[in-house]
Image (cartoon, rainbow, N blue to C red):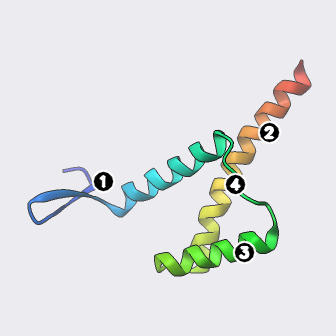
Amino acid sequence: MSKLFIKIGGRMALSEELKGKIAMSSLQNHLEKGGHLKLIPGNIKREIKNVASKNGITVGEAAEFYKIVFGEAWKKIDREFDELIEQ
């Protein structure tokens, strides 16, 4: 059995690792399709604290997740800027 699934009772359930991959992919897809995240530092800090509290993780863990998500979004934007510059 894949480590991405765990067996609960008689059924298969998503592991925390797979849930995380799905969440990351969903958020990146949302951003790529024009979804909005306000880049206002106070709002981001508040959102990170809320996510940490809601999910029972540390603020540092939530911040690391957001850092990865924003980093991936910025890489895509940066590639698009490079394409415009090269035209």
Residue of label 2: 78
Q: Marks 3 and 4: in contact by CB < 8 Å?
A: no
Residue pictured at 75% horizontal, 47% vertical: 74
Which of the two labelled residues, at mark 4 and mark 3, occupies the earlier sequence position? 3
Sequence-first disc among 2 and 4 = 4
Q: Nearer the viewer, residue 68 or 14?
A: 14
Horizontal and vertical percent position of residue 53: 54, 81
In this view, the residue in front, 81 or 54, is 54
Mark 4 lies on a secondary structure that is: helix
Q: Comparing marks 4 and 3, which lies closer to the viewer?
A: 3
Q: Residues within 10 Å of mark 2 (few under 14, many from 20)?
A: few
Query: Of the residues under marks 4 and 1, which one precedes in the sequence?
Result: 1
Q: Nearer the viewer, mark 1 or mark 3?
A: 3
Measure the alpha-carbon separation of dots 2 and 3: 24 Å
For residue 70, the mark is 4
Query: Helix, strand, or loop for circle 2?
Result: helix
Which residue type does callout 2 highlight?
Answer: Asp
Answer whether residue 56 is visible to the viewer in this image.
yes
Residue on which the image places disc 3: 45
Position of 87 relative to 9 (above/below): above
The structure residue drawn at horizontal position 48% and vertical position 55%, both measured from the top left corner, is: 23
Q: Amino acid at mark 1?
A: Leu
Look at mark 1 in the image and give the residue it sits on: 4
Dot 3 alpha-carbon crowd within 10 angstroms: few under 14, some 14 to 19, many 20 or more: some
- N-terminal of the two: label 1 or label 2? 1
CA separation in Å, label 2 and label 4? 12 Å
